[in-house]
């Protein structure tokens, strides 16, 4: 009986040892798997750092190429590298003038080599014309009269502000004579005030005036 009891106790002990060994092996496997998962899982902080190093490109700002930019009447901008029509079209206060130039078919002339000096009436100057007169001039059947009127505002050659001397006169492309007078600091052209803030262009120069020169238009 004692031998049987000892044998049974020995078997129980052996079974317990085997069970504990197996459990330890499983725990080791779980620990190894956990370590592998921790090792292969990306570090959020590391990923965020990688994303923050992506290159960015800023858009170029106007004038970065070194070309001078001139602030113009009406809060717009133009550059001396542009032609007279291009600069007139970019100046909001000359919208009516450039529209009339296109209607008269004078874009080819003003895009030519020149140089030309243009005394361009502002939008307000055109609005001051008698009611309906501008609308009539813009009609196809009145193209000749519109062309003559606009040519009365254009001069061959580039006239800077220093050449606009009181008491002198200049001949237009319409063969009319424009009389230059002065009232204090103001320069007047056939009674229209000349804005001395000129718009330099690649083929000439633009001045704005506050009246449409209709006196000598034929």
Image: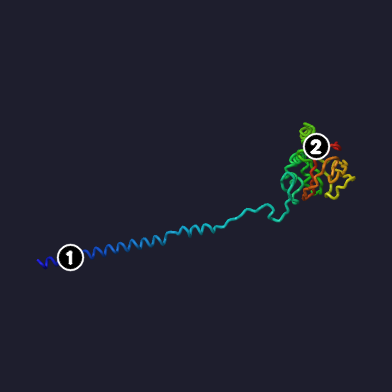
- Percent x, y for residue 55? 57, 57
- Percent x, y for residue 216? 86, 38
- Closer to the camera in the image, 107 or 128: 128
User: Measured along the vertical axis of the image, is residue 213 above or below residue 158?
Assistant: above
Residue at point 24% right, 63% down?
Answer: 19
Colouring convention used in this rendered image of the protein: rainbow
Q: Secondary structure at mark 1?
A: helix
The quadrant of the picture occupied by the C terminus is top right
- Closer to the camera in the image, 75 or 169: 75
* Front tag of 1 and 2: 1
Of the numbered discs in the image, which one, if any, rests on residue 11? 1
Of the numbered discs in the image, which one, if any, rests on residue 141? none
- Percent x, y for residue 18? 23, 65
Q: Which residue is mark 2?
A: 146
> For this view, does 155 lie left or right of residue 72?
right
User: Measured along the vertical axis of the image, is residue 103 above or below residue 28?
Assistant: above
Q: Residues within 10 Å of mark 2 (few under 14, many from 20)?
A: many
């Amino acid at each position: 009986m004692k031998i049987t009891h000892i044998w049974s106790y020995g078997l129980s002990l052996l079974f317990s040892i085997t069970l504990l060994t197996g459990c330890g092996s499983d725990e080791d496997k779980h620990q190894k798997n956990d370590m592998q998962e921790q090792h292969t899982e990306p570090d959020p902080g590391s990923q965020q750092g990688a994303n923050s190093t992506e290159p960015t490109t800023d858009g170029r700002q106007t004038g970065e190429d070194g070309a001078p930019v001139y602030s113009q009447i009406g809060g717009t901008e133009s550059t001396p590298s542009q032609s007279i029509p291009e600069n007139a079209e970019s100046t909001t206060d000359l919208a009516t003038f450039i529209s009339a130039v296109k209607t008269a078919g004078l874009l080819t002339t003003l895009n030519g080599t020149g140089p030309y000096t243009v005394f361009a009436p502002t939008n307000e100057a055109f609005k001051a014309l008698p009611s309906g007169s501008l609308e009539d001039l813009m009609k196809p059947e009145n193209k000749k009269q519109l062309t003559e009127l606009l040519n009365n505002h254009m001069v061959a050659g580039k006239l800077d502000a220093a050449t606009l001397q009181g008491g002198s006169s200049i001949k237009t492309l319409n063969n009319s004579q424009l009389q230059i007078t002065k009232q204090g600091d103001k320069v007047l052209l056939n009674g229209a005030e000349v804005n001395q803030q000129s718009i330099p262009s690649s083929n000439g120069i633009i001045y704005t005036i506050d009246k449409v020169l209709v006196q000598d238009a034929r």
